[in-house]
Image: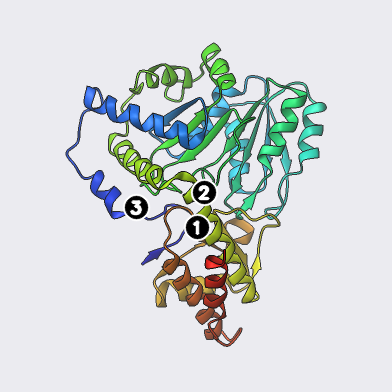
Amino acid sequence: MLLLTPGPTPVPEDIRMAMSGPTIHHRTPEFEEIFEKTRELLKELFDMEEVLMLASSGTGAMEATVLNLCKTKALTINSGKFGERFGKICEAYGKEYSELKYDWDTPSNVADVVNAIKNDESIDAIFIQICESAGGLRHPVEQIAKEVKKIRPNIMVVADGITAVGVEKIDTTNIDALISGSQKALMLPPGLALIGLSGSAMKVIEEGGVGYYLNLKTELKKQKQNTTAYTAATTLIIGLKAMLEKLHEDGFDKLYSDTKKRSLATKKALEALDLKIFPKVPADAMSAVYDEDAAQIRKILKTKYDVNMAGGQDHVKTTLFRINHMGLVAPYEAAWTLNAIEMALDEIGRRPYDGAANAIFSKELYND
């Protein structure tokens, strides 16, 4: 079965092999050496001053940043399930917040965020997705961060990059916390959350520190010593080191370039089949298609062509399908998927199969 869901992504065989060795103890010089090398590679990937690894899903990192970086009031951006989640985390802790809500296909408006900041001096942190994966949407995070920092330099800008880190080069100049997860572009099993931190964010954390397990002050102190406050996800970190070394050897810029080319070529091919790309500003991480026959198309792909794609959630549960572009997806895998979609459309009587999807995909992918 070809797994092309936007997380979890397939784990390459060489990375599985790297994680298959004997278990080592996390309080040893051997593991501290692995941890140190992994931290250095992560700093390069994130392009941030510091980075933390937490044994949790990405939601754990989201919760940790709300707890540790927002002292008075949060501003959350909601264009889908994951923007909504930041608000739910605030509610769970009784933390005051305002929400800017948009349709799932619509990116946040820079002016809306600027006005919210200007009109409420109590807001000290903004929480936003880079890619809102519920609909494959790309928010203008870097522009928002730049503009709000002009107004309030000390405001914390927290960006959920779970489906963006390792997909594209993110300008972190004005971002204070950048979140990611192991099961996306880094192609590891779920269970490891990552947080890149700016110097300003570290200052806020070191002056405060909230919670117990998700207390980033405690974790920051320990991880600077190449260990963790609590039991480390040793096997995942060993796999992460191997994956980062693999990506570093080829060059992170090559990964970004290959992902973007594959993503754009896929979207062009889908449009040639008269399929509608859902978001107004699509992210490179996935191709999200809105179609009344989405559930039927997905069923045919899974049962007949061994392609597993994700559907939608909530109000677009049966009308959306999402094709992953994160990680080391081979061009032939994307081509197979597009060919299968075209054959499924023929099967349900939408359009006769003529090989258009593969022809356009190949032309766009290899045309420099």
Which quadrant of the structure image shows residue 37?
top left
Q: Which residue lies furthest to the top in this view?
A: 207
Picture residue at 52% right of the left edge, 33% below the top: 47
266 left or right of 16 in image = right
How crowded pointer 3 is (Cα within 10 Å; few <14, some 14-19, many 20+) is rated as: some
Relative to residue 72, is residue 138 depicted above or below? below
Distance CA(mark 1)–CA(mark 2):
8 Å
First reached walking from the N terminus: tag 1 or tag 3: 3
Q: Which amino acid does label 2 sit on?
A: Val
Which mark's residue is nearer the viewer, 3 or 2?
2
* Residue 325 tag number: 1
Q: Do the residues labelled 1 and 2 touch (CB within 8 Å)?
A: yes
Element under label 1? loop
How far apart in space, not on screen, are marks 3 and 2 (Cα)? Answer: 16 Å
Give whichever of discs 3 and 2 has the lower sequence position.
3
Q: Quadrant of residue 173?
A: top right
Q: What element carries label 2?
A: loop
Report the colour scheme.
rainbow
Residue 246 is situated, as x and y percent measured from the top left of the image, at 35, 45
